[in-house]
Image: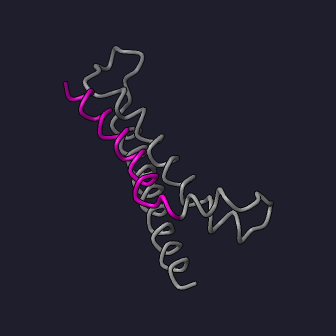
Amino acid sequence: MRRLGAAATVAFVAAAPFVIFRGILQDAMESDFRWELAYLVSGWVPFALMIAGALWFIPVVVSIGRTGYSRLYLRPVTRHACEAWGLVSYMLGFMLAIQTSQIAGLF
């Protein structure tokens, strides 16, 4: 039951930015894609970081409730590292998306 709750939470956390920052995402998709640093950083990096952060939590969710004899068991050190990488990546992407939305609101 804990694993199901954690999986639902990860799915919610992965989908929430696309609902919250829908305007920024639409602006990024409507413009022509180009390999320019300013375009990639302001348009796509926040969403990529949030998705990467959510993906870091998948091994943690899968290992919930597993014993040391299971193939899908993660040692606590590895689990905590995945949690830390996921949290930092997600929060960095979320903060960048907030800054991008504030900047886009000025123009």
User: What range of the chain is rendered magenta?
Assistant: 1-23
Q: Quadrant of residue 47?
A: bottom right
In the rendered structure, does residue 14 fall within the stretch colored magenta? Answer: yes
Callout count: 0
**On screen, 7 above or below 51?**
above
Q: What residue is at 40 percent from the left and 40 percent from the top? A: 57
Magenta span main SS: helix
Q: Residue 25: percent from the left, percent from the top?
A: 56, 58
Q: What residue is at 61 percent from the left and 64 percent from the top? A: 27
In the rendered structure, does residue 93 fall within the stretch colored magenta? Answer: no
Q: Specify whether 38 is left or right of 97.
A: right
- Quadrant of the image containing the N terminus: top left
Q: Specify whether 67 is left or right of 36.
A: left
**On screen, 8 above or below 70?**
below
Q: What residue is at 25 percent from the left and 24 percent from the top? A: 65
Looking at the image, the residue that sits furthest to the right is 35
* 68 and 106: which is toward the camera: 106
